[in-house]
Image (cartoon, rainbow, N blue to C red):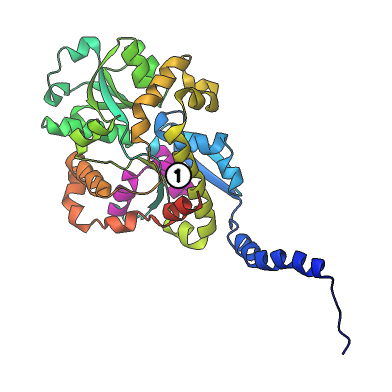
């Protein structure tokens, strides 16, 4: 048999390629099964969803091999409807929906966290606030929430329950997020709001509202919930995670990168990155709002210990129907840290 003698230089040059080959195969194997993903969100301009906007604007989704179409709805309950109706693959919404949907026999699962604090506050117009000493005094008042059934609404109901009130004792009006929230107070359309920033800080700086319940800081979440509270996350129907795990991993990797970027980004850098319209005409207030909620942004996308239990207790206090079914809830089925943990190792 004829032997073929290759120059030593050629053999050495081939070695790195042979060594790298298995890694190339693995990289190809982890390619997202779906390059185009439709994502629903309710009130994307709110700081509550800031990691989503950062992942989009900084190109983190694109880097992960995804083309993400983001459809923005009035509130979290509307974006949940898009997921359950099949018009969205994934939702960027409040973790609490995973618990409430399990109760209804329609399982959904969260897989990467954006907020480890609720980041919602309840404020009353100055002239109304003077008459309210506690939650029992809000009976009959009108509140602007992002959308009925959303987290903003649930915080309102939880506060009302502490005053012995029923859900029907307060009026919740969907006003969206951002500029529409400010307008609702300025025009006197509502007596108060249960909302996210930057709208709240704008109203505070204008001297138009007094804050009664505040979960925009770690201290506030400790006082209201007893510790960390899972807020915005990506959730989906369980089949999405089992049938397209690489796509879910790509989404998680992009969000974890955004979470990490936000830990050290300056308020000015954040304001430069988001769309101009998100600033609501006041860059300084936006930067102040971000600085105020930064500590409530997840540092790594994973669920903090005890946070799910805090969320369940909050929902039980606010919803008598869920209280009756609380022993049937399986929190382990509403969340997985698998994808965020892998994303952390890659970063």
> In the displayed structure, would residue 42 be above or below residue 125?
below
| Disc 1: which residue | 91
For the record, the magenta segment spans 77-103
At x 30%, y 11%, the residue is 208
- 228 with respect to 1 (left or right): left
Q: Quadrant of the N terminus?
A: bottom right
- 156 with respect to 67 (left or right): left
> In the displayed structure, would residue 324 be above or below residue 319?
below
Query: Is 49 in front, or is 326?
Result: 49
Label 1: how many Cα within 10 Å (few below 14, some 14–19, many 20+)? many
Q: What kind of secondary structure does the magenta stretch mostly adopt? A: helix
Q: Position of residue 22 (x, y in %)?
A: 63, 67
Q: Position of residue 197 (x, y in %)?
A: 37, 25
- Residue 271 seen in render: yes
At x 31%, y 44%, the residue is 96
Q: Give the quarter of the image for residue 43.
A: top left
């Amino acid at each position: 048999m004829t032997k073929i003698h290759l120059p030593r230089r050629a053999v050495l040059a081939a070695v790195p390629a042979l060594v790298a080959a298995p890694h190339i195969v693995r990289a190809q194997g982890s390619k997202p099964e779906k390059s185009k993903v439709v994502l629903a969100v309710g009130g994307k301009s709110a700081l509550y969803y800031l990691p989503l906007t950062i992942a989009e604007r900084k190109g983190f989704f694109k880097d992960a091999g995804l083309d993400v179409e983001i459809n923005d709805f009035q509130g979290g309950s509307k974006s949940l409807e898009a997921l359950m109706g099949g018009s969205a693959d994934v939702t960027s919404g409040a973790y609490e929906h995973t618990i409430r949907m399990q109760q209804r026999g329609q399982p959904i699962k969260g897989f990467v966290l954006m907020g480890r604090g609720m980041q919602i506050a309840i404020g009353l117009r100055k002239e109304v606030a003077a008459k309210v000493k506690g939650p029992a005094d809000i009976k009959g008042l009108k509140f602007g929430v992002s959308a009925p059934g959303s987290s903003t609404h649930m915080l309102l109901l939880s506060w009302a329950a502490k005053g012995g009130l029923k859900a029907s004792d307060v009026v919740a009006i969907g006003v969206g997020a951002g500029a529409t929230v400010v307008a609702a107070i300025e025009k006197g359309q509502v007596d108060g709001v249960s909302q996210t920033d930057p709208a709240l800080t704008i109203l505070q700086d204008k001297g138009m509202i007094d804050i009664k319940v505040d979960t925009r800081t770690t201290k506030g979440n400790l006082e209201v919930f007893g510790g960390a509270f899972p807020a915005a996350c990506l959730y989906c129907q369980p089949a999405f995670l089992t049938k397209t795990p690489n796509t879910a991993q790509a989404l998680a990797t992009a969000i974890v990168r955004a979470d990490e970027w936000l830990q050290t980004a300056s308020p000015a850098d954040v304001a430069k990155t988001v769309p101009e319209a998100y600033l609501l005409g006041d860059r300084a207030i936006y930067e102040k709002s971000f600085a105020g909620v930064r500590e409530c942004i997840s540092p790594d996308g994973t669920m903090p210990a005890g946070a799910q239990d805090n969320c369940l207790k909050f929902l039980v206090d606010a919803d008598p129907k869920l209280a009756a079914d609380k022993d049937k809830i399986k929190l382990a089925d509403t969340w997985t840290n698998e994808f965020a943990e892998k994303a952390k190792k890659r970063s």
